[in-house]
């Protein structure tokens, strides 16, 4: 309907333009300007409606995938995305899984690239979500799984304690350079132990930030090994102040960090602030550079990629 109005408006403009070229009066020029303004408004409205339609289509696709996979999982009890992949689903997207100790099934985003089978835990890409959230929000998860989100500490605990899992972290800066870090045997304890983090051997190109960077002197206060999770409303760090409050995001803080992927999203990379509260991976870009894209994802350590 809007498209029809726009066509009619364009027709009127042509007629008005021709008649004004024959008649140079002020009123004619004013009428032409008014019609041009109306055409611009209609174009804006049309563009907005197209955007809305595009968003609705995306939501509909996600909803359909979700619904289809719900039925599939009720028969087979897939406990993570590696089992979803092995069951023959090789498209990245939303699927239903139920980790063995989890009381209920849940929807997760499965990344079927890089060998497939990755259960995505966290994603940053444009700053659309705030990550300065409460303990209960980090516990249950928040955000949009097709964009920015945190899967949830409770489910992280259930997935990582049902076997040996590797965590892969994909990072990208604003120059479109990419690095990765991978940790074997990553485990997140239960809520009673404040979702304490432990991990094994590092491999990758981004530097071993979770162990506290590359200087031994720093690891005492910057290592995340064995750290409890903290949020602004639950201070479990080793610092006299509150790292989560100062650095504005939940994380496994020490005193305070050498990696903080749940920090504030700064859209230009380099930033200045009272504290190092950006999306930080210290050994690669330092404390005063906030990364453009991060993805954290889990897969069984002994997973065999199909050739
Ligand atoms: Ca403290």
Image (cartoon, rainbow, N blue to C red):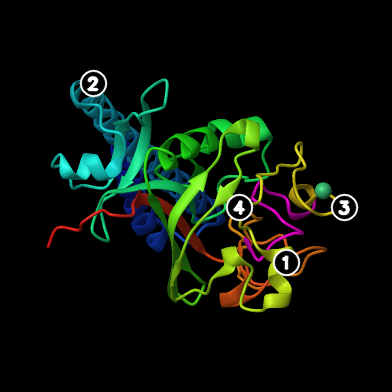
Q: What residue is drawn where x is 49% and y is 62%?
A: 293
Task: Look at discs 4 and 3 and give the one toward the viewer.
Answer: 3
Where does label 3 land, which residue? 240
Where does label 2 land, which residue? 74
Task: Look at discs 4 and 2 and give the one toward the viewer.
Answer: 2
Vertical order, 49 against 24 (above or below): above
User: Residue 127: percent from the left, percent from the top?
Assistant: 57, 53
Q: What residue is drawn where x is 52% and y is 65%?
A: 292
Read off the magenta span.
Answer: 246-259
Does label 2 point to a residue whose CB lies under 8 Å from ligand 1? no
Label 1 to label 3: alpha-carbon separation: 15 Å
User: Residue 85: percent from the left, percent from the top?
Assistant: 20, 45
Q: Is residue 64 left or right of residue 179?
A: left
Vertical order, 31 against 157 (above or below): below
Label 4 to label 1: alpha-carbon separation: 21 Å
User: Are circles 4 and 2 on residues that touch, CB within 8 Å?
Assistant: no
Label 4 to label 2: alpha-carbon separation: 33 Å
User: Residue 14: percent from the left, percent from the top?
Assistant: 32, 54
Vertical order, 245 against 190 (above or below): below
Where does label 4 land, which residue? 262
Quarter of the picture holding the C terminus: bottom left
Does label 3 point to a residue whose CB lies under 8 Å from ligand 1? yes
Residue 256 lies in quadrant: bottom right
Question: Which residue occupies the foreground of this view, 8 or 108?
Answer: 108
Does the stretch in magenta take in 251? yes
Q: Earlier in the sequence, mark 3 or mark 2?
A: 2
Does label 4 point to a residue whose CB lies under 8 Å from ligand 1? no
Where does label 1 land, which residue? 220
Q: Main secondary structure of the magenta part?
A: loop
Q: Secondary structure at mark 4?
A: loop
Q: Earlier in the sequence, mark 4 or mark 1?
A: 1
């Amino acid at each position: 309907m809007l498209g029809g109005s726009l066509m009619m408006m364009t027709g009127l403009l042509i007629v008005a333009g021709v008649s004004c070229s024959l008649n140079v009066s002020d009123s004619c020029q004013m009428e032409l300007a008014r019609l041009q303004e109306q055409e611009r408004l209609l174009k804006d409205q049309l563009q907005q409606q197209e955007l809305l339609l595009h968003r609705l289509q995306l939501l509909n696709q996600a909803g359909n995938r979700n619904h289809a996979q719900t039925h599939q999982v009720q028969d087979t009890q897939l406990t993570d995305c590696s089992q979803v992949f092995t069951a023959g689903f090789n498209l990245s997207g939303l699927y239903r899984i139920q980790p063995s100790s989890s009381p209920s099934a849940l929807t997760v985003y499965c990344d079927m690239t890089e060998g497939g089978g990755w259960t995505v835990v966290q994603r940053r890409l444009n700053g659309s979500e705030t990550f300065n959230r409460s303990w209960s929000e980090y516990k249950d998860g928040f955000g949009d799984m097709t964009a920015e989100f945190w899967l949830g500490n409770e489910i992280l605990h259930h997935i990582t304690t049902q076997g040996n899992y590797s965590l892969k972290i994909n990072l990208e800066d604003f120059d479109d350079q990419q690095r990765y870090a991978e940790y074997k045997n990553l485990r997140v304890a239960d809520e009673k132990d404040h979702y304490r983090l432990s991990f094994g051997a590092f491999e990758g190109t981004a530097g071993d930030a979770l162990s506290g960077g590359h200087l031994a002197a720093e690891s005492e206060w910057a290592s995340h090994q064995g750290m409890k999770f903290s949020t602004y409303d639950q201070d479990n760090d080793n610092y006299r102040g509150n790292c989560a409050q100062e650095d504005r995001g939940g994380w496994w803080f020490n005193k305070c960090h050498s990696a903080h992927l749940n920090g504030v999203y700064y859209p230009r990379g380099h930033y200045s602030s009272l504290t190092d509260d950006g999306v930080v991976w210290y050994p690669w870009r330092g404390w005063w550079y906030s990364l453009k894209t991060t993805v954290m994802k889990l897969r069984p350590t002994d997973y065999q990629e199909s050739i």
